[in-house]
Amino acid sequence: MQQAAAEVGRLYAERFGIARDPAFYLGKLTEEMGEMTAAWLKLNGRARGEGSRAALEDEAADVLGFLLVFADWQGIDLAEAFRRKWGVHLPDTFASECRP
């Protein structure tokens, strides 16, 4: 998943002529978090405009995608980091699935 996101990120930058400098990676992640927040607020009647579940899902996918792109840029194996950080909190029956 991380490799696929990195490739989509490369294609995105190429298509729109974006220089992917350090500000790009965190900037896009922050932008997408804001868009996901706005989609949630609209969906729940806490902001003006019509919201939809599809819009929220799309923005959540963008957040995940840009998190994966950021992790790839930083050389983070996000799956391994997740197993290390979150897997220890799972019951034994599930923890083995999250451990390498």
Image (cartoon, grey):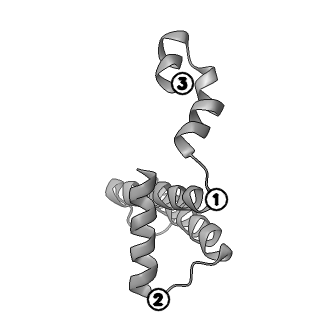
Q: Secondary structure at mark 2?
A: loop
Quadrant in the picture for residue 33: bottom right
Q: Where does the image place residue 21, in percent across and percent down from the top left? A: 63, 78
| Residue underneath mark 3 | 99
Farthest-out residue, bottom? 17
How many discs mark residues in the rendered view?
Answer: 3
| Residue underneath mark 2 | 17
Residue 10 appears in the rendering: yes
Q: Which is more N-terminal, label 3 or label 1?
A: 1
Q: Secondary structure at mark 1?
A: helix
Quadrant in the picture for residue 22: bottom right
Relative to the observer, which residue lies in front, 17 or 48?
A: 17
Please name the amino acid that badge 2 sits on. Gly
Farthest-out residue, left? 54
Please name the amino acid that badge 3 sits on. Arg
Residue at image point 63% right, 72% down: 27
Judged by depth in the image, the label closer to the viewer, 1 or 2, is: 1
Residue at image point 56% right, 45% down: 78
Q: Where does the image place residue 23, in percent across and percent down from the top left? A: 67, 75
| Residue underneath mark 1 | 74
Q: Where does the image place residue 98, in percent across and percent down from the top left? A: 51, 26
Please name the amino acid that badge 1 sits on. Gln
Give the Cα distance between marks 1 and 3. Answer: 22 Å
Q: Which is more N-terminal, label 2 or label 1?
A: 2
Q: Secondary structure at mark 3?
A: loop
Marks 2,3: beta carbons within 8 A = no
